[in-house]
Amino acid sequence: MKTIISPSILSADFANLERDIKAVEKAGADWIHIDVMDGHFVPNITIGVPVVKSIKKVTSLPLDVHLMIENPEKFIKDFKDAGADIITFHYEAVEDVMGVINFIKSLGIKAGLSIKPKTKPDEIFEFLPYLDLVLVMTVEPGFGGQSFIHDCAQKIPVLRQEVEDDLIIQVDGGINNITGHICVSLGANSLVAGNYIYKSDDLSRAIKTLKG
């Protein structure tokens, strides 16, 4: 399976978001990664439903929406209606994980589950057969531009040996040409990168490098 590259718009210029989204689309991105933060689950606030709705109008790429929020089940339908194609929520943010997975699936979109650096992979084994995507955070969620936590990458082969080949194992946090290669070699097949792509002089080359 090819490596799916999902540039994080957290590193884009929000005053020129349409330009920056079209730029990565033209450069070969597969998805657009949208980080939604509420200032409660993580210590930062980013964007909400209206921005996702606006993004949907300017790109044909799938919108990969990562909810770093408390009570995600209250907002999932709104994000789906705004144009999300994949909704990933945090294992640590809900009590009824299976209920939230089923709710996302019932809306006809892909369901993802994310784990923070301190969460062990075996805590989510029971949910793997029902998911389309697992997101391994290799930084503490909340801010872009953090350094890659190498220990977290060791969760990737542990998850990979538990799942079917078609499950997407996505990695987010400190991804660049070196850390991205490490993650793919361990079994990841989707990479989220913000600064590495958006701060590059050549977007196409940065995306190609991540695709290996």
Image (cartoon, rainbow, N blue to C red):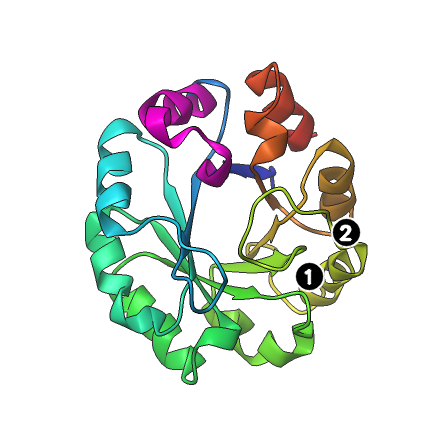
Q: Nearer the viewer, residue 30 or 177?
A: 177
Give percent across and percent down for residue 114.
Answer: 53, 64
Q: Nearer the viewer, residue 185 or 80?
A: 80
Q: Amino acid at mark 1?
A: Arg
Query: Residue at 32% of width from left, 25% of height from top?
Result: 18
Query: Residue at 40% of width from left, 54% of height from top?
Result: 45
| Quarter where residue 152 is shown | bottom right
Of labels 2 and 1, earlier in sequence is 1
| Residue segment shown in magenta | 9-25
Q: Which residue is mark 2?
A: 186
Q: Which mark is residue 199?
A: none
Assign the C terminus to one quadrant of the image: top right
Total count of labels: 2
Looking at the image, do the residues carrying marks 2 and 1 touch, with CB atoms under 8 Å apart? yes
Q: Which residue is mark 1?
A: 160
157 shown above or below 85: below
* Residue 15 inside the magenta-drawn segment: yes
Give percent across and percent down for residue 73.
Answer: 31, 72
Query: Residue at 67% of width from left, 72% of height from top?
Result: 121
Assign the N terminus to one quadrant of the image: top right
